[in-house]
Image (tube, grey):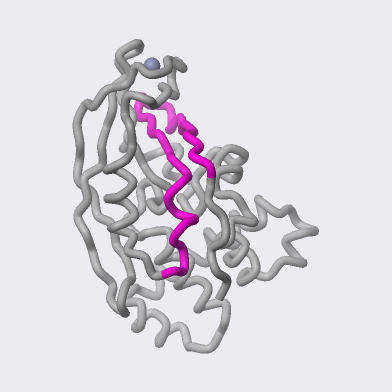
Amino acid sequence: MPASAFLLSTTIRFYYESYQYNLMIRVFNAFGKSFFRGNSDLMIFNNFMDTFQVEKATCPHCGAKYNCAYFSSYSRNLITFENGANTCHNISITRVICNSCRRTHAILPDNLIPYGSYALSFILTTLRAYFLGTKTVTDLCDYFQISISTLYGWIHLFNEQKLIWLGVLENATVSPIKFIDDISTQMISLNLFYKTINVSFLEPFKTIQFNSS
Ligand SMILES: [Zn+2]
């Protein structure tokens, strides 16, 4: 298993979500430091939010800088796989408001997947185990305590987004495990993926059109 090697620069990007006014601020500086190192996703999230400076954010709608303020928060689940257990945490997502355009934006660090409860590291760890092929699908799902349909949904989405990212020719030469390992070592940038595809990696495409928050 590769060691996580790089620190991502603190890059704030903005995600215009669907046709509605629900925007989010995705921040890609938390995930890469800890992937495959066994760090708690909950700890990563809490540490990130403890240090995130709302007043320094730039509004993804109007582009105003240093003019956001805390607005509200909402609860969502974060499902992690740590110490051999599938664990559901309830976390609080901060929503900020732009004082220029009055739009609100959720703050999401990169170990979260928009509209998904499972931590990104959980899904990639599960997929890596699947592609290694050392366990049957049934045993794999029992181990990670997920349904078979959930696993196949992840596999489908992974394959679909890997193909989009790499293109047909390169996709044929890059194994799924190498792709996952390249993400874990940040040879593949989740930030660049998001910027290019306009969807977070492993975020279902349909949420772009139909979900609202
Ligand atoms: Zn604004």
Q: Quadrant holding ligand 1?
A: top left
Which quadrant: the C terminus? Answer: top left
* Number of dots carrying numbers: 0
Q: What secondary structure characterizes most of the magenta part?
A: loop
Q: Position of residue 142 (x, y in %)?
A: 34, 83
Q: Position of residue 57 (x, y in %)?
A: 39, 26
From the viewer's perspective, is 5 left or right of 82?
A: right
Q: Is 17 inside the magenta-drawn segment?
A: yes
Query: Which picture quadrant has residue 175?
Result: bottom right
Viewer-closest of 157 and 111? 111
Q: Position of residue 25 (x, y in %)?
A: 40, 34
Please report the residue visible at 29 percent of the width from the left and 57 percent of the height from the top. Answer: 43
Query: Which picture quadrant has residue 90?
Result: bottom left
From the viewer's perspective, is 140 left or right of 183?
A: left
Looking at the image, residue 139 lies above or below residue 41: below
Looking at the image, residue 54 lies above or below residue 139: above
Q: Position of residue 87 (x, y in %)?
A: 25, 68
Please report the residue visible at 51 percent of the width from the left and 42 percent of the height from the top. Answer: 199
**Residue segment shown in magenta:** 9-37
Please report the residue visible at 42 percent of the width from the left and 23 percent of the height from the top. Answer: 58
From the viewer's perspective, is 81 left or right of 35?
A: left
Viewer-closest of 181 and 203? 181
Which quadrant: the N terminus? Answer: bottom right
Looking at the image, residue 121 lies above or below residue 110: below
Query: Which picture quadrant has residue 117?
Result: bottom left
Please report the residue visible at 44 percent of the width from the left and 24 percent of the height from the top. Answer: 60
Q: Residue furthest right?
A: 169
Looking at the image, residue 208 lies above or below residue 122: above
